[in-house]
Amino acid sequence: MAIRINPMTALNSDYRSFAFTQPKPIRSPKFAMASTLGSSTTKVESTKKPFTPPREVHQQVTHSMPPQKIEIFKSIEGWAEDNILVHLKPVEKCWQAQDFLPDPASDGFMEQVEELRARAKEIPDDYFVVLVGDMITEEALPTYQTMLNTLDGVRDETGASPTPWAIWTRAWTAEENRHGDLLHQYLYLSGRVDMRQIQKTIQYLIGSGMDPRTENSPYLGFIYTSFQERATFVSHGNTARHAKEHGDLKLAQICGIIAADEKRHETAYTKIVEKLFEIDPDGTVLAFADMMRKKISMPAHLMYDGRDDNLFDHFSAVAQRLGVYTAKDYADILEFLVGRWKVADLTGLSGEGRKAQEYVCGLAPRFRRLEERNSAKAKESVNVPFSWIFDRQVQL
Amino acid sequence: MAAVPVTCVRLTTTSMHTNQILGKTSTLKLVPMGRVTRGFPCLRTSRFQISCSAKPETVNKVIEIVKTQLALSADSEVAPDSKFATLGADSLDTVEIVMTLEEEFGISVEEENSQNITTVQEAADLIEKLVEKKNTTA
């Protein structure tokens, strides 16, 4: 089938939907897997006003977790303090963006910048498109902190709440904040990209937000973040590898250090969900199946630059082609999580729980089969311009 | 190969069905002339529309594939106008159904077309169209 599984869009699983499941999108839907490949929500573009970024069109559901379950999260605050906060790095031990950039206070600054630009010149446009997309995703951090604070039982009620959950969320946000800063400054100095278009895209994206369909449920929320952290770990790991191949070891270091953070965050989130499987296996497996059915939507799936109505599709197609983040990765991450949380070994499940368990355990092979078949099909190459690189064209 | 290239004659008021008379003939006859080699056009609606709808074998094959995909029992009710969604298919199921149909019939379904497949009948009709196209361009 010519349907290309675009992990980025698909994962936004709701992003792409077939005619019978969702309202017909204006654009050609792709079977979106995770938010990367994730579920894609079909977006509806307004045909009346110009410069209208895409919007979520699915029904936005709230507070689907029964309120009694909020108790669970209160009761494990002690556990969270001892087992989750340990995955945060003390600020004094943390890297800062400046550690990886030319030093403006040094005499050698200009020379360092020239060197950075000389290395960047050797890196092709398609790589930059993906790096920019990743940077824009990181820069939309306000949306993610917001999303964490929508979750019942774990939200930061005041902005300075002393609960372990709130401490985690703030510190996590602070660590993530360095990622966007670092990539932004690198891209600025590189001279390879149109910073104004990129900045505009960021403004649109933060304005758009996103609904990951976690419905204020920390079960859904932490499963979502587990998936996402692993996805970003894979993605940045791949951009690091590519940078090395293109001869830019410093850029490889940048991407690598970001990937290391993501890995640490993944460890924390998967631990929380592991605890939930221990306390409430039925509820957690149902939540897992629910998120996978809805497909993990990519955080930046609503990205818009004022020009391209299919910007996210285009960006994720390039990421797929370059092997930075692919449909196969989506399947791999799913398989990893199923193994990590020992879903196949769960016992004492309800009827619905068993169905959910079966669904989740059987899902990765189905995605793989689809993707194998898909990649076997020859596709005509399409080139599209990206405003992020001054409308230069890149192959999808 | 026949001297008289005759395929299904269609009289239709809709623009959906393409003219299937290929080869030398360019006129569309109102009355079927010569041998009709395919399933005969059936009168489907009260509108004056005669169109070639899919052969029963094709429809049955589709039903079989749908039942397997959705783990429905052999004697469960699946009619040609059954909607996949109503039978319990999610978007992944539909993609897989179309994929199985491609493999089974040796065809390739374009993305745009696959969105229009919501029922068994639509799938069967598209299959026949694509098989026809494949056979004539081979």
Image (spheres, coloured by chain):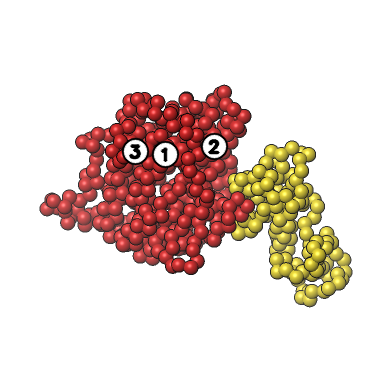
Chain colours: A red, B yellow
Q: Check the image and name the residue furthest to the bottom.
A: B27
Residue at the farthest right position: B34
Helix, strand or loop for disc 2? helix
**Total numbered badges shown on the rendered structure:** 3
Label 1: which secondary element: loop
Circle 1 residue: A151
Who's the residue at 77% across and 57% down the image?
B54
Which amino acid, mark 1?
Leu
**First in residue order: circle 1 vs circle 2:** 1
As displayed, is residue A152 above or below residue A322? above
Q: How far apart are marks 3 and 1 (CA)?
A: 9 Å
Q: Please say if A282 is above or below B54.
A: above
Report whether A16 appears left or right of A72: right
Disc 3 on helix, strand or loop? loop
Report the amino acid beneath label 3.
Asp
Q: Residues under labels 2 and 3: Cα distance?
A: 27 Å
Residue matched to label 2: A289
